[in-house]
Amino acid sequence: MVILSIGGALLAGEKLGYYDDRFSLAWMATLSIATLVAVILRTARHLQQIDRSRGNAEAELAALNAALELRVVERTSELETVNRTLMGEISQRQKVEDEVRRLSLTDELTGLHNRRSFFLLADQLMRSARRNDQFCLLFFIDLDGLKKLNDVHGHEAGDLAIIAAAQVLTAAFRQSDVVARIGGDEFVVLAVDAGEPSDALSARVQALVDEFNGSERCRYPIGLSTGAAGCSPKELKPLGELLACADASMYVNKQSRRQQNAKWVQACV
């Protein structure tokens, strides 16, 4: 509009004879350039303001991103700390649970299987033996004279005798055999596919008892009465019945040992 107004004024002056057309064109060109420069400068200032605003916005965005990243790092670190603490607590609880489970299945004095553990494992092994056509041998072992030992020398002596008996039985049988203490002076062993007759295994137990009694480790001599019962895969004897048979066999062995000891004492007198 400005250029058009100025152009109209120049044209009117030219018609009135104040100046010629060259002067009018020169002014027109000069004013057009000046107006164009003004427009360019104004546009440049506007663009500069836009750039400045954009720069400020980018700086604010960068600051927000940096703050967010820092918060994420801090939060991640907090979560990692919480996770480590939680994993530590879970690990500790697992250890406690494992220890409780171990204690619930282990005889505290000897480290052998306890009664509960024996019946759980023995039932599983006997089922497996039947499936695999394997012969089972169950031994019932009684520690002789434990009550008298406790009465005369105290329960510490009795504990030492029980520990010695456990060590003898562990040495006499294989790692795959289940050796357990099911009562104060009562032990049982389940041997699957032993590869040896019960007499040979009982003799090995007695040999190890004699070896212990003659060693420097022996503070109180021990005696073990042993009974055994066998079960073929086709007999399918229940564990309780097999245990009763081995117990009866052990009692016969104990009575025989007592009679032999009595005869030996009479012969010495």
Image (cartoon, rainbow, N blue to C red):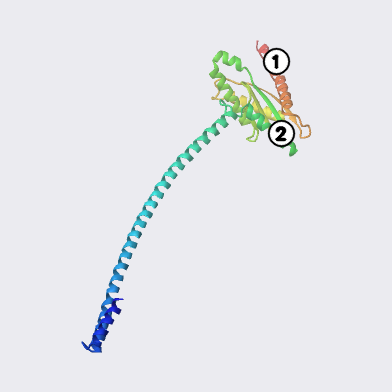
- What residue occupies the far left of the structure in this picture? 18
Q: State whether residue 14 appears in this view.
A: yes
Mark found first going from the N terminus, 2 or 1 = 2
| 255 and 189: which is toward the camera | 189
**Residue at label 2?**
126
User: How busy is the neighbourhood of tag 2: few (under 14 within 10 Å), some, or many (20 plus)?
Assistant: many
| 261 and 232: which is toward the camera | 232
Which residue is at a point 41% across and 46% down the rendered structure image? 75
**Mark nearer the viewer, 2 or 1:** 2
Which residue is at a point 26% across and 84% down the rendered structure image? 12
User: Which amino acid type corresponds to the residue marked 1 in the rendered image?
Assistant: Gln
| 64 and 130: which is toward the camera | 64
Q: Judging from the image, what secondary structure is the residue with disc 1 in? A: helix
Which residue is at a point 70% across and 19% down the rendered structure image? 251
Judge left or right: residue 37 versus residue 87: left
Q: Position of residue 103 (x, y in %)?
A: 56, 29
Q: Quadrant of residue 242?
A: top right
**Residue at label 1?**
259
Relative vertical location of residue 11 with respect to residue 97 in this rendering, above or below: below
- What residue occupies the far front of the structure in this picture? 16
User: The C terminus is located in which quarter?
Assistant: top right
| Distance between the alpha carbons at the discs numbered 2 and 1 | 35 Å
Residue 5's tag is: none
Q: Quadrant of residue 162?
A: top right
User: Which amino acid type corresponds to the residue marked 2 in the rendered image?
Assistant: Met
